[in-house]
Image (cartoon, rainbow, N blue to C red):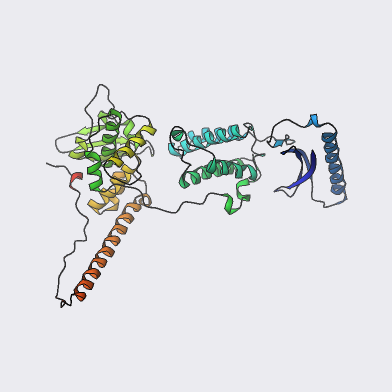
């Protein structure tokens, strides 16, 4: 057995002393709650000499009496920090959640993300056998360990019984934003002097994912998707709900909460009038005949759709897409992006798209106009390639070029099934 006194530099310029214990191929560390201070005068120098002497005494005791070494396997052993009155990490996250829940400035989505952070943190700390670690002890090394666990070891619950998939870049970055905000709030309320996150190197954090276009279905793909004959009740119900959402822009939370009483009927139009679950804002969306035809028969209760569990919804969507030859990796939220693209293509008016989708600002809606712009650029590029190919073939055949006129239609194709078929 070898026991070595080692030092660890802290953010406040102090140095923490700990024992590096190596025995039979196993290593563990015992932090001694002993600190060397910056030697600014003779008094601190004398105190540091006493601290080092105490560290050597503990090392000698561990060598002479190995039974006094804490038995915690390979895990890091951390003594209590003197005067550590900071709350436990999990308790503080819950305090933050309670505070947000009572504050109308925060949406339910943000609260849910914070609850998800608490779930992940509890899983991580249970894995590390440190469920009661405090804010002060959760330093930058713990931040790094948490991020590495999220990236390499955590398996979302929905993948437990199928092929394991790690969290995507977007999810990792979102969790990182949540924990940074939680610790920033601890600093603001005087529970911490500084947020350890900002001590991390750039290579230790999750970068913001590169902006990518939202996944959506084209009109032809949507028709093929809805034409699939599904016999399983759960799959058929998911298919109907997804198609209806593609033509109304409802989120899955709104689909689950949708009632027949939310549909206002008159001689001219059928309109959905709902309070959106995410934004708490009132929104009215007209329902076309195609969307009405994809609704299920009215049941005994007032709910329109009865979807299975989320994991089963995702599985059903991927099953149908594969069956009809759609190679896109779609989720239920893909329906909302599809609606945004369809409305923007039909109207060409971003303000109308914003209102129908219930967005609070044009910034969220602009992505749909950008997607259509990029699609038009691709179409023009393909047209240029086609004409270049024709030119080469004519030259090879030595056929004199004749004047040709080409009428091009720059307006997006009208999507008829969005309109009422009267």
Is residue 302 visible to us here?
yes
Pick the residue in front: 71 or 215. Answer: 71
Residue lying farthest to the left in this orientation:
422
Expressed as whole percent of the image width and height from the top left, the position of residue 245 reads 28, 39
Q: Position of residue 231 (x, y in %)?
A: 25, 30
Residue 55, quarter of the rendered image: top right
Residue 106 in view here: no
Q: Looking at the image, which residue is at 54% across and 39% down?
A: 153
Report the residue that reaches farthest toward the top. Answer: 300
Residue 226 horizontal/vertical position (percent)? 23, 39
Query: Closest to the observer: 204 or 266?
Result: 204
- Give the x, y percent position of residue 18: 76, 41
| Quadrant holding the N terminus | top right
For the image, the number of numbered tags is 0
Indicate whether 95 appears above or below 246: above
Q: Tell me the quarter of the image containing the C terminus.
A: top left
Q: Tell me where residue 263 sits by quadrant.
A: top left
Please give left or right for residue 420 compared with residue 55 in the image.
left
Image check: 212 left or right of 103? left
Residue at the (15%, 70%) spot, across then down: 405
């Amino acid at each position: 057995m070898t026991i070595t006194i080692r030092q660890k530099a802290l953010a406040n310029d102090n140095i923490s002393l700990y024992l590096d214990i190596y025995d039979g191929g196993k290593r563990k560390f015992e932090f001694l709650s002993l600190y060397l201070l910056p030697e600014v005068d003779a008094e601190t120098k004398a105190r540091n000499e006493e601290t080092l002497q105490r560290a050597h005494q503990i090392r000698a005791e561990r060598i002479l009496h190995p039974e006094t070494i804490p038995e915690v396997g390979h895990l890091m052993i951390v003594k209590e920090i003197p005067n550590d009155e900071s709350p436990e990490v999990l308790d503080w996250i819950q305090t933050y959640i309670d505070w947000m829940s009572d504050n109308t400035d925060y949406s339910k989505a943000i609260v849910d993300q914070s609850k998800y952070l608490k779930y992940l943190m509890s899983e991580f700390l249970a894995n590390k056998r440190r469920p009661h670690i405090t804010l002060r002890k959760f330093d930058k090394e713990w931040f790094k360990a948490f991020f590495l666990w999220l990236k390499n070891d955590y398996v979302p619950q929905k993948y437990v019984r199928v092929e394991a998939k790690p969290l995507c870049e977007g999810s990792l970055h979102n969790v990182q934003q949540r924990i940074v905000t939680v610790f920033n709030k601890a600093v603001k309320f005087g529970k911490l002097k500084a947020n350890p996150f900002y001590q991390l190197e750039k290579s230790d954090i999750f970068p913001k994912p590169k902006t990518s276009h939202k996944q959506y279905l084209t009109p032809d793909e949507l028709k093929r998707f809805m034409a699939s004959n599904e016999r399983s009740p759960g799959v058929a119900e998911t298919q109907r709900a997804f198609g209806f959402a593609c033509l109304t822009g409802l989120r899955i939370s709104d689909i689950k909460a949708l009632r027949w009483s939310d549909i206002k009927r008159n001689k001219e139009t059928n309109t959905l009038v709902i309070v959106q679950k995410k934004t708490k804002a009132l929104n009215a969306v007209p329902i076309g005949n195609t969307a009405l035809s994809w609704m299920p028969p009215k049941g005994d209760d007032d709910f329109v759709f009865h979807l299975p569990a989320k994991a089963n919804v995702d599985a059903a969507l991927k099953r149908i897409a594969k069956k009809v030859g759609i190679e896109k990796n779609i989720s239920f939220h893909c329906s909302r992006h599809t609606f945004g693209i369809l409305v923007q293509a039909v109207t060409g008016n971003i303000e109308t798209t914003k209102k129908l989708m219930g967005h609070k600002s044009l910034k969220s809606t602009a992505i749909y106009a950008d997607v259509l712009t990029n699609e038009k650029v691709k179409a023009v590029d393909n047209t240029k390639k086609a004409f270049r190919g024709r030119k080469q073939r004519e030259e090879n055949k030595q056929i004199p070029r004749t004047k040709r006129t080409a009428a091009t239609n720059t307006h997006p194709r009208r999507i008829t099934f969005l309109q009422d078929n009267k």
